[in-house]
C-alpha cells in the first residue's frame, strides 16, 4: 500500500468528532416527533462509524437499514458512476427516512439514492445527514439537512472513510500530504 499510517496528518480528533455527532443527534431529535418511527438508512461502508454513533443518541423509535453504494472504487476521485451493490428497500409508506452518509463530494451518489427513494418508497419525508460536506466539490444540487463538518477539497480517511479499503477503523479523521 502506497499510503502509510505514519504519513497521515490528523484533521479532526476523536473527541471532536464524538461531540459534534452528539450535537447533530440533538438537532435531529428536536426536529422529529419522539413517538414517530424514523427509518435510518446507512450507506455502506463509509457511513458505518458515523451511523452507529449517531443512532445511539437518537431518542425516537428507530428502524435501521443498510445499503451499499459506491462511486469512488479504489481511487481517490469519483468515477462519475454509482455502483449499487444492494439496493432493495421496503416501501416506507408515509414514514420518515433519514439517509446517513459519510461524505458528500460531487453529490452524485446521493442524487442517485434520493431519486431512487423518491421513485420507489412512498415515504412521508426524506432527510440527509452527512459527517462531512465537501461543498467546493459539488456538481449536483444536493444539500444535506445535517452536516457535522464542512471540509476543503482534500482526500480524507478514518472514521469509516477508506483508502483502498484501509483506515476505516481509525477513531479520528486525517489526510495524506
Ligand atoms: P460523491 O458521489 O458525492 O461524489 O462521493 C461520495 C462518496 O465518495 C463518499 O460516500 C465516499 O465513499 C467517497 N469520497 C468522497 N470524498 C472522499 C474523501 O475525501 N475520502 C474518502 N475516503 N472517500 C471519499
Image (cartoon, rainbow, N blue to C red):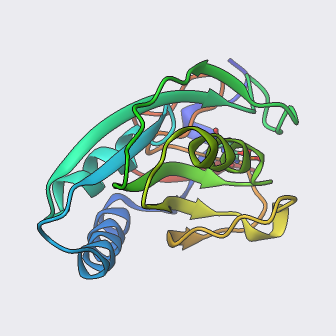
Q: Toward which corner of the image does residue 29 lie, by quadrant? A: bottom left
- The reply to whether residue 168 is in sight is yes
| Residue 155 horizontal side relative to residue 51, left or right | right
In terms of depth relative to the viewer, which is nearer, 168 or 42?
Answer: 42
- The reply to whether residue 171 is in sight is no
Q: Position of residue 109 (x, y in %)?
A: 70, 43
Q: Position of residue 80 (x, y in %)?
A: 88, 36
Q: Position of residue 62 (x, y in %)?
A: 20, 50
Residue shown at 73% from the left, 24% from the top: 73
Q: For the image shown, how many numbered marks are present on the structure?
A: 0
Residue shown at 11% from the left, 66% from the top: 35
On screen, 122 above or below 43?
below
Residue shown at 82% from the left, 38% from the top: 78
Name the quadrant of the N terminus.
Answer: top right
Find ligand 1 in the image and state its quadrant.
Answer: top right
On screen, 156 above or below 151?
above
| Residue 147 horizontal side relative to residue 153, left or right | left
In terms of depth relative to the viewer, which is nearer, 88 or 50?
Answer: 88
On screen, 60 above or below 157?
below
| Residue 3 horizontal side relative to residue 174, left or right | right
Residue shown at 34% from the left, 48% from the top: 40
| Residue 177 horizontal side relative to residue 66, left or right | right
Q: Position of residue 18 (x, y in %)?
A: 29, 63
Amino acid at each position: 500500500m502506497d499510503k502509510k499510517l505514519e504519513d497521515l496528518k490528523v484533521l479532526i480528533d476523536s473527541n471532536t468528532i464524538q461531540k459534534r455527532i452528539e450535537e447533530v443527534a440533538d438537532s435531529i431529535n428536536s426536529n422529529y416527533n419522539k413517538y414517530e418511527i424514523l427509518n435510518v438508512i446507512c450507506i455502506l461502508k463509509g457511513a458505518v462509524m458515523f451511523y452507529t454513533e449517531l443512532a445511539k443518541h437518537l431518542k425516537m423509535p428507530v428502524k435501521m437499514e443498510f445499503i451499499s453504494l459506491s462511486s469512488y472504487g479504489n481511487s481517490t476521485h469519483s468515477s462519475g458512476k454509482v455502483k449499487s451493490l444492494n439496493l432493495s428497500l421496503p416501501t416506507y409508506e408515509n414514514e420518515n427516512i433519514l439517509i446517513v452518509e459519510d461524505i458528500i463530494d460531487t453529490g452524485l451518489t446521493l442524487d442517485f439514492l434520493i431519486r431512487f427513494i423518491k421513485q420507489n418508497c412512498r415515504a412521508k419525508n426524506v432527510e440527509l445527514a452527512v459527517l462531512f460536506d465537501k461543498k467546493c466539490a459539488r456538481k449536483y444540487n444536493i444539500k444535506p439537512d445535517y452536516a457535522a463538518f464542512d471540509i476543503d477539497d482534500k482526500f480524507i480517511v478514518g472514521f469509516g472513510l477508506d483508502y483502498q479499503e484501509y483506515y476505516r477503523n481509525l477513531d479520528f479523521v486525517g489526510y495524506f500530504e
